[in-house]
Amino acid sequence: MKTICKFSFFFLALALTACRKDPPKEPEIPEEPFVFEVVDGWITSPQWLVEKVESMAYDGGTIYPVVYLVKYDEQDYILIWDWLSSDNLQGRFYFTSSGKWIDPDVDPQADYPYPRSELWRSLEEARDNNSTLLWSQPPLEEPFVFEVVDGWITSPQWLVEKVESLSRQGPESRVYPMVYLVKYNEQDYILIYDMFSSQWTDGNLFFTSSGKPIDPGEFPKGAGLYHDLFEVKQTNGVLLWTQPSPAKDQSFFTRAWDPTTVTTPNGWPIDVYIDTEEHTADRILSDLDHVRTHYPLAEVIGNPTRKYNCHAYAWHVSEGGNYVWMGIYHPERFYVGDNSFVSIAPEILPGAKVAYVNVDHSAVVETPGIFISKWGDGPLMRHPKDYDPYNNFIPYGTSELTYYIRTPTIDGPPSLSHQQSATYTVVNPPSQFTWDISGNYLTRSGSGTQITLTANSPSVSTSVPVRLKVGNTVVATKSVWVSGGNQPPPDYNVYSLEITSHGNFWNPAITMNDQALYLGSEEGWLTARILPVAPSHTNYTYVWSMDIYEDFGIWSGDPHFYTTDGGREETIYIPVNFHGELNVYCDIYAGSTLHQSVEIRGLDILPGSR
């Protein structure tokens, strides 16, 4: 349907008499005829109005302003009213019929109601009695037809496909998401809540009734329309559908689990399960057919099995462990938290563990760009890194990936005298790494996992950091005290910093940079301690300091030291709900001379539980 309304404006100049003394005024240039066209409910002319209305559309082009014709002083003006653009204007913008903006001349320094230009005020007064609605947004969506047959959604088709793609523990033994109808601004929206799809959205995926995804926008609760829907889902949401019981295949819910425990390389216990049953032969063939049909670029390297899952394969089975089902959420937090593994992101090494940040999945790097991972209780697969069913959980794009390797250490003497040599060996060496030794006080010979360091400092005594790097990431550091001359240093000990956790933390001690501690819903305490204890040097003074970086606005206060008495041990208080990063430093003085500086940087305080 096409609607055309035409409005013409002409201004006539008065004829001036020949005897008039004042010079004649220039005639005003008349406005072009205002041709207003609507096709299929949407404005198509004039072009300036099309562009202006489109630019004022809210929430990514889904909510449009309304347009009025306002008559004043025998002239026609256009009012575009969007309610949002400006508090000072209450969202009202006036234009001439050719698109020239009527400047309100608002004085933001004045008291409310803000003074405006005379013409703008006159148009506001005329709006109540001399305005006509020209256009408002047509209905956004076709009627939403929702059908369920035998407990399963059959219409609309986009919802059937989306719910199926978000099913979990597949491909047959599945847990399906819940579906809600959310009313907002007289429109119907669909919420698919699967609790797993994204840490960013907490599994809340919103769609229009025709299946268009609503962009979440920015962390933590989205922006624009997504934010509004998130806010009203509790009051305006109605449960449409949840998985019927019994489900298509109830094996996931009726499995015979035998609980047991495995440990990280550093000994932290993790609760896991042993499944005493196995898939039927038909189920195995069905799963193999499914992945070969839908993922032809991936390769099956292990049959479907209920004995282990993706997390167990990546973190335990691939390291020589037995078959177990590791059902915890994001197990990397345990392996990194106790310093068994260290992050090397964005470096990618063969054998590195991969954690999918936005979904609950783990993999192992075979070669850069090629992963091996177990797909639920389906098969073990070799696949390109962005080619797997878990990226279907993301409403757009692919999951962010982080990479981890076994934490290496450097074994060797803590100090060397001038011209003394010693061997230093890498324990748990990465497949690729480089040595990094600061200054000229230590000379290196050899390469690879074992090198020889020779002290070269006739007079200066100092601490030299010896580091291992993967790319630009430092993965291990050992401080070697180089003593000037041939005498041992006044204090043979080379000190290090250890941070242990108490209260509501579950992690053990932290001794390296870029580690994480997980804090529950209560406050916690950290003990920062200089090691080893050296009673013969009780005259040392310890000067503590700390950098604090808060992740987002949780106003529970900042971490702080309990005391600053110059002792070798300090207690750090961590308030409730603090999430962020700490750098902790200690300068060790012998009298007024700086003996050594120690630090732990990049200590992440993250939400978690025991």
Image (cartoon, helix red, strand yellow):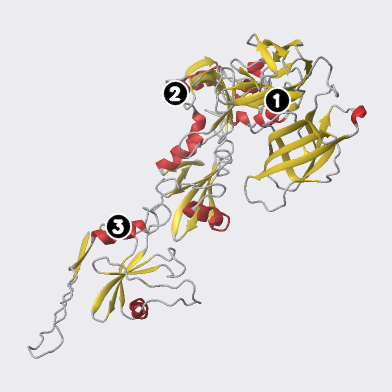
Looking at the image, the residue that sits furthest to the top is: 446
Amino acid type, label 3: Glu
Q: Quadrant of residue 425?
A: top right
Query: Up-down: is 342 above or below 41?
Result: above
Q: According to the image, label 3 marks what residue? A: 51
Amino acid type, label 1: Tyr
Is disc 3 surrounded by few (<14), some (14 to 19) or many (20+) residues within 10 Å?
few
Residue drawn at the location 56% of the way across and 17% of the way down? 350
Counting from the top left corner in percent of width and height, residue 290 is at 46, 23
Q: According to the image, label 2 marks what residue? A: 295
**In front of the other: 577 or 485:** 485
Please tell me how many numbered marks the rendered image carries: 3
Q: According to the image, label 1 marks what residue? A: 273
Mark 3 against mark 2, which lies toward the viewer?
3
Mark 2 against mark 1, which lies toward the viewer?
2
Q: Quadrant of residue 436?
A: top right
Amino acid type, label 2: Tyr
**In front of the other: 73 or 511:** 511
Cα–Cα span, label 3 and label 2: 44 Å
Between disc 3 and disc 1, whose residue precedes?
A: 3
**Mark 2, secondary structure of its residue:** loop
Between disc 2 and disc 1, whose residue precedes?
A: 1
Is disc 1 surrounded by few (<14), some (14 to 19) or many (20+) residues within 10 Å?
some
**Mark 1, secondary structure of its residue:** strand
**In front of the other: 362 or 188:** 362
Q: Tell me if residue 261 can be seen.
A: no
Is disc 2 surrounded by few (<14), some (14 to 19) or many (20+) residues within 10 Å?
some
Mark 3 against mark 1, which lies toward the viewer?
3
